[in-house]
């Protein structure tokens, strides 16, 4: 958690770490999203899909933290 926050703050970006609980931070705020599903680790390309969804949500939301959270929630709802 602290490393993710430090990276986000240093690079002035949002860090999204996926796992059983996704961690999304801009260095100040931290969002935790429970997206545990056995298929996430069994399907090739989930990270690529997450990146594409993040880009799509970022194109329509001016708040990068919220955009990544929306993408993570979408991923959790579709698996």
Image: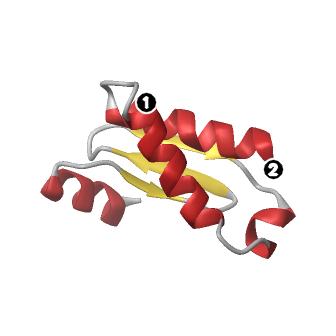
Residue 66 is labelled as 1
Residue 18 in percent (x, y) is at 57, 60
Name the residue nearer the viewer: 8 or 79.
79
Image quadrant for the N terminus?
bottom left
The residue under the point 37% across, 46% down is 25
Where, by quadrant of the figure, is residue 29 drawn? top left
The residue under the point 33% across, 35% down is 64
The residue under the point 55% across, 64% down is 48
Q: Earlier in the sequence, mark 2 or mark 1?
A: 1
Q: Say which residue label 2 marks.
A: 79
Answer left or right for 56 relative to 41: left
Which is more foreground, mark 2 or mark 1?
Answer: 2
Residue 41 in percent (x, y) is at 75, 72
Where, by quadrant of the figure, is residue 45 drawn? bottom right
Answer left or right for 59 relative to 52: left
Task: Label 2: state its secondary structure.
Answer: loop
Q: Is residue 45 above or below residue 77?
A: below
């Amino acid at each position: 958690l602290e490393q993710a926050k430090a990276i986000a703050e240093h690079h002035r970006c949002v860090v999204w770490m996926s796992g059983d609980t996704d961690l999304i931070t801009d260095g100040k705020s931290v969002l935790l999203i429970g997206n545990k599903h056995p298929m996430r680790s069994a399907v090739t390309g989930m990270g690529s899909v997450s990146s594409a969804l993040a880009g799509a949500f970022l194109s329509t939301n001016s708040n990068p933290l919220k955009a990544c959270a929306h993408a993570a929630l979408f991923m959790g709802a579709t698996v």
